Image: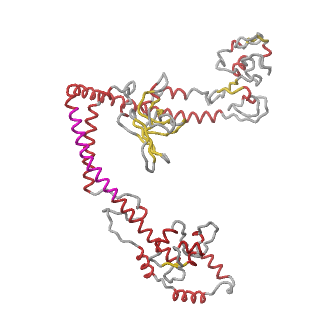
Amino acid sequence: MTWIICFLYLSFHVCTERQFYEENKPFTCLDGSRTIPFDRVNDDYCDCRDGSDEPGTAACPNGSFHCTNAGFRPTFIPSSRINDGICDCCDTTDEYNSGAKCENTCKELGQKEHEVLQKMAEITKEGFLLKQQLIQEAKNRQQEKQSKLTELQNNKKELEEKVEALRTVKETAEQPEKEAKELHLKAWEEQKAIIRAEKDKAKMAEAFLELDDDADGFVAVAELQTHAELDTDADGTVSETEAQGLLGGVDHVDTASFEKVWDNIKDKYVSEPAPVDTPPEESNKLADNDSEQYPSDDDVQEEEEEDEEEDDYPEEDFDKVRKSFLVQAPPTVKTPPKKDEDEEAMPPYDDETRVLIDAAQKARDNFEESERALNIEKEISFDFGPDSEFSYLYSQCYELTTSEYIYKLCPFNRVSQKPKYGGSETNLGTWGTWAGPEDNKYLLMKYEHGTGCWQGPNRSTTVKLTCGKETTVMSTSEPSRCEYLMEFTTPAVCQEPEAVISSLHGHDEF
């Protein structure tokens, strides 16, 4: 009886408190509130306020039931779920008297969890080996930095003068770079405007020919009335008055006057669909039908000959009309795109601009390198972990692209967010401090004082670090308004793999 009660007991004292459940002795509630005869334990009536007398029934609303789940993980469920017809314990022990048809799935669940833990153990092992490399590299860098710091302290004034001189060189080089880029962009915007204008003229020419049903060289009121999409009063039809209004108050217009009309209708105008080829099986069906309903080949040939005679717009005339609308303009960018789908892609910079960009970039690199040397004292003061294992993240940035944004994490610096399809960057927080739990503060990074939200707080980001073989941003979310959470994997947080491996043997044998 004692082992059964140990198995069913309601709290974490499942087996350590078995001495309180001794047969043939009065039972005292574990909260000390009262003592009852032992035969009232598990009698489906709640005698103790803490529910300790009913560890195997649902009598006490505040009680818990212990699922042993041999082969998987033990767990606790509220006593109210015992014998409720729903299988909560994978070993089915919660439905011992309900008649519910439960299947013991603990072995399968345990095997799946075992596989997950096995994979975690492998990742932890490899990550921990990488961490040892990072620690060794950090020691080497630390020695170099200490040497540089000593040199800095001896020549700080000279280095500060060098930084300021390189700043001037950088700014001097960036000015012509900026001007050249702006000229290139301006030229490309002008070129795009020309391309779009030419496309619009071409569409206008096609629309004129489609609307000119009788091919007399004019678009008339009656011809506009055949296009219901041009309706202006939303009654579903184009009246004579509406059509005349679209034509500028006249009965018809020629190609020279159609441009103003096109400006009025191009947003609504729907081009006439091209003829659709009849599938072979449909052709066979037509051929089998009554000859009176469907014309013969001879009749079709005669109609085609008549159409050719009446066609006043052969191909050469079509090109002539199209050209009458187009405006020719010389390109202003040396390498215009060759295909329509590339219209929005700016062509590469020319050689002169490229030289200016390279010179400015070199000046920036020289300045940043000298500035880092000047700031080495600040870098050494950072808390990069117990063995400086996080120091490799300094001066690095990692990005994650989602459907809407590009997120950038620069450890020990800042977190930012930028719209994927253009727009300004938003600061989601600058480096604050390590914010993990007491036993390992290096599991969380806190970035604070970002861009303020509209009528809200300043943005901030918590970065959760997990063990992984690679260093990468895994995900981002916004659990609360203006408070972001970023998942970041790095081998620098990987611990000795023994803890994970030992958990593989924490279950009962399968």
User: Image quarter for residue 377?
Assistant: top left
Q: Position of residue 68 (x, y in %)?
A: 66, 26
In the rendered image, the vertical position of residue 246 relative to residue 461, given as above or below: below
Q: Observer-nearest residue: 222 or 101?
A: 222
Instruction: Please give the range of residues in magenta.
Output: 160-186
Q: Residue at x 44, y 41 (%)?
A: 426
Say if the magenta span includes residue 185: yes
Q: Position of residue 245 (x, y in %)?
A: 55, 72
Q: Observer-nearest residue: 7 or 453?
A: 453
Q: Position of residue 480 (x, y in %)?
A: 54, 35
Would residue 174 be found to the left or right of residue 478 on screen? left
Q: Residue at x 25, y 27 (%)?
A: 149
Would residue 338 be found to the left or right of residue 4 on screen? left
Q: Tell me if residue 54 can be seen.
A: yes
Say if the magenta span includes residue 265: no
In the rendered image, the vertical position of residue 27 relative to residue 268, given as above or below: above
What main secondary structure does the magenta stretch of the protein show?
helix
Would residue 452 be found to the left or right of residue 140 on screen? right
